Image (cartoon, grey):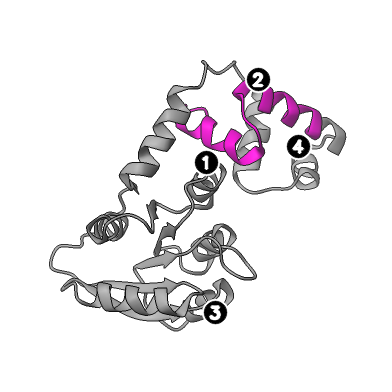
Amino acid sequence: MDTTDRTIRLQLVEDHDLTRFGLRMLLSAQPDFQVVAEGRTAEEGLEQLGHFEVDVVLMDINLPGMDGIQAAQEVRRVRPDAQVVMFTASNRRDQLFAALASGAVAYCLKSAPPEVMFQAIRSAASGAVFFDPESARHLLHTVQGSAPLAPLTERDMAILRLVADGQANKDIAATLGISVGLVKKHIGEILEKLQATDRTQAAIKAFRAGLI
């Protein structure tokens, strides 16, 4: 999206009223931002996307009910042209990887200066990936601290692609015509080869390594 001389339409999804009010005031003061919708829950935010034209969704991760990670995946389904910026107090590695896997293009800590949040939103609106400096250092440390990845078989790659698409073990088994037990066995081997702690991290590592 070319954001030159164009207003970026924002949706805020944040369950704390005071935080959401402060964000609205801060963002509305920017000449190229327009807050067009606000939601207290992911479910409310997703419902609004059917009624408002939105360029960027500023989403908290820790929401009541559906969390921001799952909601980001739903945003891609409901309004695929909208970009998601995760705006959270958490710098946990698992949430950082999960945010990437969910389709969010930017990750910004609530402790970051306002200018960093503005940059995250503008980057997301232009289709670029953005991490606030602290999260970027955390991610880089994780990647640099990893040993070289073991080679994957063709079956590993096929299963990993389906994992990245969000398919459950039984769906992968049906797609490939193999047993659920064999899928579990392969996934265990994939996690070991990629030195990953879970399916999400395995998919992210494979993507960053250009394997899928």
Nearer to us in this view, 16 or 190: 16
Gap in angstroms between the C-alphas marked 4 and 3: 37 Å
**Residue wearing tag 3:** 44
Of badges 2 and 3, nearer the viewer stands: 3
Question: Residue 40: image x %, image y %?
Answer: 51, 78
The disc at residue 153 is 2
Q: Is residue 100 left or right of residue 24?
A: right
In primary-sequence order, the first of circles 3 and 1 is 3
Farthest residue, direction bottom: 51
Q: Is residue 172 left or right of residue 63?
A: right
Name the element at disc 3. Answer: helix
Q: Which residues are magenta?
A: 183-212
The amino acid marked with disc number 4 is Leu
CA neighbours of label 3 inside 10 A, class few (<14), some (14 to 19), many (20+): few
In primary-sequence order, the first of circles 4 and 2 is 2
Q: Main secondary structure of the magenta part?
A: helix
Gap in angstroms between the C-alphas marked 3 and 1: 27 Å
Name the element at disc 2. Answer: loop
Eyeballing the image, is 121 above or below 167? below
**Residue wearing tag 1:** 93
Q: Which residue: 79% across, 34% down?
A: 183
The amino acid marked with disc number 3 is Glu
Callout 4 touching callout 3 (CB < 8 Å): no
Residue 212 in sight here = no
Callout 2 touching callout 1 (CB < 8 Å): no
Of badges 4 and 2, nearer the viewer stands: 2
- Quadrant including the N terminus: bottom left
